[in-house]
Amino acid sequence: MKRVGWLGWRADTTPTPSVPMQAFRAGLADLGWKEGDNLVLEVRIGEREQAPALAAELVRAGVDVVLAQGAMIFAARAHTGSTPLLFMINGDPIEAGLVASLARPGGLATGVTALGVELSGKRMEIIKGAKPGIKRVAILANGRHPGVTTELAASRAVASALGLDLNYFPINSADELDAALAALSAYKPDALVAFPDTLVNQLAKRIAEFSTRLRLPAISGWSEFALAGNLMSYGPNLGDTYRQLARYADKILRGAKPAELPVEQPTRLALTLNMSAASAIGLKLPQALMLRADEVIRS
C-alpha cells in the first residue's frame, strides 16, 4: 500500500474545485493505482497559512510523495523533510528556488510549470485581437504567486509594443478581491487580464460577474476561467496538467528520484471562447479569432 499526499489550497470558504483532483486520481488509476487496494490518497486542504501544519500532518501519515498546489509547495518544502514533492506552478520554478534547473531539478521537488511568463504576453495580444480598439488594460493577479514579477514585466513589454496602458491590481487572498475590483473599476480599463493561479481560478465566477457588469473582455490561463463566465482563456489544459503529475507520482512510487525527473511543460495549449460572455458584454469576436479557438462555449 502506497500513500500519496495532496496538499491543496482553498482560497476562500468554498471547497477547492475538483477538476485537478479528479484528473490526478484518474491519471493514477490509469497507471494501475487503485485507492483502497494499493493506494491511499491523503488529502489536506486549507488556507496558505495552514500549509506548514498540513504538510507536517501528511508526513506523520507516512506519505511516499506529496503533491502541493501552487504556493503551498513552499510550506511543504520546509516541513516535509526527505519526502519527495510534486508541484504545479504558473511561474518559473528556477526563479522560485524550487529546482536547480528544468532538466535536472537536483533536489526533492519536481513537477510542471505552466509557462506563465511565456504566455502572459500572448494573452495580451489575444485580448487586443478580440477588441482592437482597447487602450487601457488592467492586470489582476495574486501578489504572492511565484513568478508574478516576471509575468508582469513580460506583460508590460508587450503592452508597450501594442501601445497599451497597463495598471496592476494585486490581491493576496479572496478577502481582498472586492477592494481590488473597486480600484480596478476606477481605473476604467478596456480589458482585464488575470494571471492564472489557484487563487484566481477559485475566484473566476466573482471576476466574471464583475467583468460582465462593466462589459469588460477578460482573459486568463485555465479554461475554467472561461467556463465560469469570463470571455476567454488561453493556456494549458488543467486536467492534462494534473495527469502529467500523476505520471510523475507513479514514477516516484516505483523508485524514481525527483532530482532526476525534468520539470515538464504543458503538452498542449488551448484557446477557449465563451460566446455567452461575449454577448453579455456586447462584443462581436473577429472571425479570425473564432477560427483559432480550440473550444467554443455557447451556453
Image (cartoon, rainbow, N blue to C red):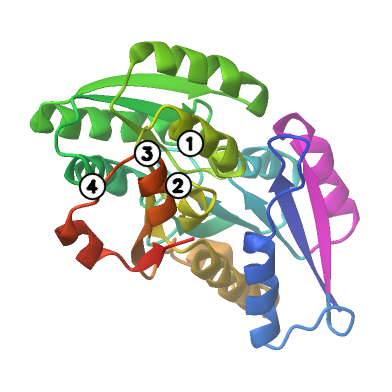
Q: Which residue is mark 1?
A: 146
Front position among marks 3 and 1: 3
Front position among marks 2 and 4: 4
Q: Which residue is mark 4?
A: 126
Q: Which quarter of the rendering shows the N terminus?
A: bottom right
Q: Which residue is mark 3?
A: 281
What secondary structure is found at the residue carrying circle 4?
helix
What secondary structure is found at the residue carrying circle 3?
loop
Disc with the residue nearer the chain's start (2 vs 3): 2
Q: What amino acid is at disc 1? A: Pro
The residue depicted at 77 percent of the width and 59 percent of the height is: 5
Q: CA–CA distance between discs 1 and 2?
A: 7 Å
Q: Position of residue 21 (x, y in %)?
A: 69, 63
Q: Nearer the viewer, residue 211 or 271?
A: 211
Left or right of 299: which side holds 9?
right
Disc with the residue nearer the chain's start (1 vs 2): 2
